[in-house]
Image: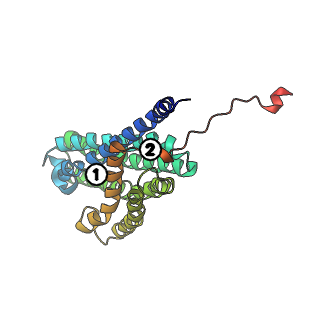
């Protein structure tokens, strides 16, 4: 086989891997970008008890819900796209990454549903008993707050423990990128514990500062996968599925 034909064969073999890296990178950046503006859209419903009685901007809930649904779907997408690659190095962590990513997305969906419930109360029962409606809305907002903590406030740490460990060991990307994730994961866990026990609010200066390493890890991974892709020299071929006839069947 000539050198040129070997190069062509190698390029063709690596082309699907490059597409996988590009898709994963775009999904990571999409998750990162869409996770930011929802907080602004939710400001009235979360911070104004009188929102359910007609105060504030009702459409903000709908836009925030749509954005968070997209965020949840792109989060699942990153796990599904990367699973086929990660499982070649550590099948347990690959499954764990998918599971934690889906759990994070599920928490987001529950939070969206709870705030859409407030929107329904605002539309249908604003003229009723103000005390009862406000109490019901406050309960739904509390559910949203807890899902925000248990989902985006906690699950990214476990995502990093699974994915960053594999990427660090495999050298599919420069080690500095997964190192940031492995450092950021315990910091995020500490922030989660502090928020859980009331040391500070989840949307506060200290919380945002402690979440910064995880944010940098996910953003830098997304950018690297888009621009450079995986380290071709470290990519393992996917194990072939054996089609041999079982010994018992030959007997």
Dot 1 or dot 2, earlier in sequence = 2
| On screen, residue 207 above or below 226 | below
Residue at left offset 78%, top offset 31%: 246
**Front: mark 1 or 2:** 2
Is 57 on the left or on the right of 223, as rendered?
A: left
| On screen, residue 239 above or below 53 | above
Instruction: Judge the density around disc 2: few (<14), some (14-19), many (≥20) Cα neighbours within 10 Å.
Output: many
Secondary structure beneath label 1: helix
**Looking at the image, which is closer to me, 100 or 186?**
186
Instruction: Judge the density around disc 1: few (<14), some (14-19), many (≥20) Cα neighbours within 10 Å.
Output: some
Residue receiving disc 1: 136
Residue at left offset 26%, top offset 47%: 33
Secondary structure beneath label 2: helix
Q: Position of residue 26 (x, y in %)?
A: 33, 41
Is 201 on the left or on the right of 91, as rendered?
A: left
| On screen, residue 215 above or below 227 | below
Query: Looking at the rendering, in which quadrant would you find the C terminus?
Result: top right
Query: Looking at the rendering, in which quadrant would you find the N terminus?
Result: top right
Q: Position of residue 4 (x, y in %)?
A: 47, 30
Is 1 on the left or on the right of 22, as rendered?
A: right
Residue receiving disc 2: 79
């Amino acid at each position: 086989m000539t050198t040129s034909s070997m190069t062509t064969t190698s390029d063709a073999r690596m082309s699907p891997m490059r597409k996988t890296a590009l898709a994963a990178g775009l999904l990571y950046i999409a998750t990162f970008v869409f996770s930011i503006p929802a907080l602004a859209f939710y400001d009235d419903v979360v911070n104004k008890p009188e929102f359910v009685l007609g105060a504030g901007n009702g459409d903000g809930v709908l836009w925030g819900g749509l954005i968070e649904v997209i965020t949840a779907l792109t989060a699942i997408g990153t796990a599904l796209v990367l699973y086929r690659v990660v499982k070649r190095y550590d099948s347990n962590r690959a499954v764990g990454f998918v599971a934690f990513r889906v759990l994070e997305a599920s928490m987001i969906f529950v939070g969206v549903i709870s705030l859409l419930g407030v929107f329904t109360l605002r539309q249908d029962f604003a003229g009723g008993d103000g005390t009862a409606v406000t109490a019901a809305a406050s309960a739904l907002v509390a559910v949203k707050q807890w899902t925000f903590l248990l989902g985006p406030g906690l699950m990214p740490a476990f995502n990093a423990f699974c994915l960053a460990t594999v990427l660090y060991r495999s050298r599919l990307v420069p080690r500095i990128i997964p190192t940031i994730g492995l450092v950021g994961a315990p910091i995020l866990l500490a922030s989660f514990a502090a928020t859980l026990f009331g040391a500070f609010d989840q949307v506060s200066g200290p919380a945002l500062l402690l979440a910064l390493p995880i944010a940098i890890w996910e953003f830098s991974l997304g950018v690297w996968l888009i621009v450079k892709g995986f380290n071709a020299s470290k990519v393992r071929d996917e194990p072939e599925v054996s089609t041999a006839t079982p010994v018992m069947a030959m007997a």
